Amino acid sequence: MNYTFNAKETTEKAAQWIRDFFEKNGKGCNAVIGISGGKDSSICAALCVKALGKERVIGVLMPNGEQSDIDMARLLVNHLDIKAVEVNISEAYKGVLNGIENAKSVNGFKMDSISNQTIVNLPPRLRMAVLYAVSQSCNGRVANTCNLSEDWVGYSTRYGDSVGDFSPLARLTVAEVKEMGRFLGLPELLVDKVPSDGLCGKTDEDNLGFTYAVLDRYIRTGVCENPETKALIDDKHIKNKFKLELMPCFEFQP
């Protein structure tokens, strides 16, 4: 399958899609975006500026205590010249964990420990709560910044960075998102920043077990030469599809 991506055309269409969304679902509202300093939040913010103007884009920086690359997030905010706030989630994060650790036993039940997955996924869930708090206080709509490559293999936190009110990048691979970032004139430092989960100190590709280049090619062409990698991608895709689906509900028939 031959496939050529047109960054200019896609960027223009994505910007118009954002305008159309706000016309129908929040006329005059602001786009509220969590700014991590990574490529996805940077490019999503730049798209919203192109679509709505910088006056209607609000960035939210949310370090958990000390964030080693917080300067990247500030670079993006200054480059786009958008309004922004910085909310440190450290106290909320510690408060939840302390609350669970010291939870009062009811009917003899007591949690033995807090799982590592809880510790890893709590920060993105707190960040999403902050984004909606800011959004509701600033007449906003929350941008989801996930891309197709991440969504394909479930590389997001359910009810954390996987949600939002509108999602401009959800049907675009990592490679395509980066091309759009270059077209939008973002600093190469932000477009080519090595993606990491911001949770456990590893890069995305370390955690996944394959590169985004391999994943993107498989998504767009169906080609993956390594059968073990193909099986791993397929397994992650099948197991994580539920993250993108509506919550199952009991269908009562009166």
Image (cartoon, helix red, strand yellow):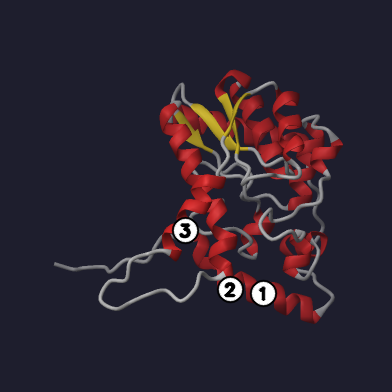
Residue located 57% across and 73% down the image: 239
Q: Which residue is mark 3?
A: 98
Q: Residues within 10 Å of mark 1 (few under 14, many from 20)?
A: few
Residue located 43% across and 63% down the image: 100
Looking at marks 2 and 3 on the same chain, the residue that comes earlier in the sequence is marked by 3
Q: Residue furthest left?
A: 254
Q: Which residue is mark 1?
A: 234
Q: CA distance from mark 2 to mark 1?
A: 6 Å
What's under tag 2, amino acid-wise?
Ile
Callout 2: helix, strand or loop?
helix
Which quarter of the rendered picture does the N terminus lie within? bottom right
> Splitting the image into 4 quarters, where does residue 121 fall?
bottom right
Looking at marks 1 and 3 on the same chain, the residue that comes earlier in the sequence is marked by 3
Place of residue 162 in the rendered image (x, y in percent of width and height, measured from the top left): 55, 53
What's under tag 3, amino acid-wise?
Asn
Q: Which residue is mark 2?
A: 238
> Splitting the image into 4 quarters, where does residue 18 fall?
top right
Question: Nearest the camera: 56 or 254?
Answer: 56
Q: Which callout, 2 or 3, points to the residue nearer the camera?
A: 3
Residue located 54% across and 33% down the image: 32
Q: Residues within 10 Å of mark 2 (few under 14, many from 20)?
A: few
Callout 3: helix, strand or loop?
helix
Q: CA distance from mark 2 to mark 3?
A: 35 Å
Q: Check if mark 2's residue and mark 1's residue have beta carbons within 8 Å.
A: yes
Place of residue 23 in the rendered image (x, y in percent of width and height, measured from the top left): 46, 27
